[in-house]
Image (spheres, rainbow, N blue to C red):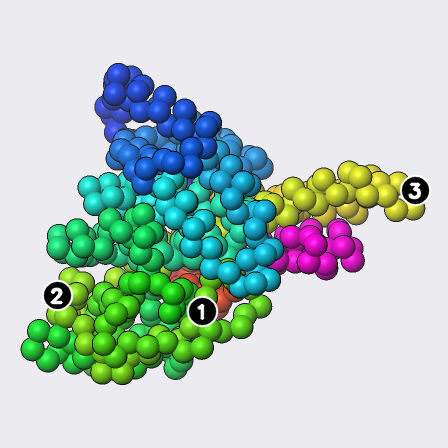
Amino acid sequence: SVMGRRHTVIDFDSQFDELFESSKMKLLSKCVKRVALSHSRTAKPCFYKNVGYLKRTCSHNVISHHISDGLDQEQKQIQEVALNFAKEEMFPNMALWDEKEIFPVDCLRKAAALGFGAIVVNEEYGGTGLKRLDSSIIYEALSQGCVSTTAYLSIHNMCVSVIDHFGTLEQKEKYIPTLATMDKMASYCLTEPGSGSDAASLSTTAVKKGDHYVLNGSKAFISGGGDTDVYIVFCRTSPGTKGISCLIVDKDSPGLCFGKKEKKLGWNSQPTRAVIFEDCRVPTKNLLTEEGKGFPIAMKALNGGRVSIASCSLGAAQASLQAALEHVKVRKQFNNILGNFQNTQFNLAVMATELSASRMMVRNAAMALDQGHAETAVLCAMAKLFATRSCSKIVNGCLQMFGGYGYLKDYPLQQYLRDIRVHEILEGTSEVMQIVISKSLLAA
């Protein structure tokens, strides 16, 4: 496992120990711990300022079935803050947001105040400056409170990261500060009605006319569509894969409109609409990098997105397994508690094993992203394929242990199950993940 000390994909800074012992580091550690324990709701967006740029070890310890095993002290503190936020701000509202299809903007802004609005983004522009592994830990924790809301948060973060990695200084200064606080929110626009898994066949066009591009076409299944303020749009400026470009489109752009709000099985706390361009005018200065560089941007973003979505599945599975464990310790049938039946014990053992294996794969892929590992795309695909499938199976198995009660909306397991079903479809279907993996194997 690359999670171990000897085989880690992370390169350690030889001067880390000396840096960690410095008074600055000690002070920072105390500040992080203090805020983590107090769960301050008034924290600034740069709550974890500088933490992401420290040359920290990612793991010195054995990974076990507990969610905190293998994490360093700072990661545990970050995780604790996210878990507390999930418990206090998200879980009590999860069912209502789902039933009434409420987009919890205020809650998202509270999360952003803790530094969760631009987690891996450079702190120079208002980001938190953490690592991909840290973001995975955060998403897993928050998803225990609400998968749907956390999944949108991860998509918003993906958009901000695209601007951070590929934007000009002007673009970063204009967009990142308000996106980091979530005063403005973002949507990722790649999928089209006629191009889902085959993203390279997208047909939305952008024709350059003077100092503007004129966009025509539409995007499908866009999370936040119509309610968000900034759209990262992939469009065609010339034929072929190398003819795909990426533009930042503001909501008030002339010619931008939206379809009806979709009715979905899950993910109901985030609106989903088609995003439609009808001679939509976008300034040429909103082009990310240069024409023809859009497809690599999309693929790089999706690698991170796959880890994030898999992390959300981990959270749902963890919460479901914990609920099942508590249930089988008290529920009686045939004059015996369910936890005493060997079938129950065996099912719990298998689910815990699959959840631990999934977490290892997801965190490993996150570290590969941080490292820039040569096999990052494959590791992300493997993690998403295995974790999303396994976690769906785990949640379903936990629901089964509740019997008829698990089927009721009074209990959260049915919502976890509905919310994570789409994780095997978006950010690349399970079938596409297998294509990515098999291509790498056959090319070796």
What type is the residue that disc 2 sits on?
Lys
Mark 3 surroundings: few (<14), some (14-19) or many (≥20) residues within 10 A: few
Lateral position of residue 196 relative to residue 254, left or right: right
Compute the Cα span from label 1 to label 3: 48 Å
What type is the residue that disc 3 sits on?
Asn
| x and y percentages locating residue 431 in the rendered image | 48, 68
- The quarter in which the N terminus is drawn is top left
Tell me what residue is drawn at x 33 percent, y 70 percent. Answer: 190
- The quarter in which the C terminus is drawn is bottom left
Compute the Cα span from label 1 to label 2: 28 Å
Foreground residue, 311 or 274?
274
Residue 125 vertical position relative to residue 162 in the rendered view, above or below: above
Disc 3 element = loop
Mark 2 surroundings: few (<14), some (14-19) or many (≥20) residues within 10 A: some
Q: Which mark is residue 285?
A: 2
| Residue, disc 1 | 272
The residue range painted magenta reads 391-415
Residue 274 vertical position relative to residue 269 in the rendered view, above or below: below
| Residue, disc 3 | 335
Give the mark, 1 or 2, whose residue is nearer the N terminus.
1
What type is the residue that disc 1 sits on?
Thr
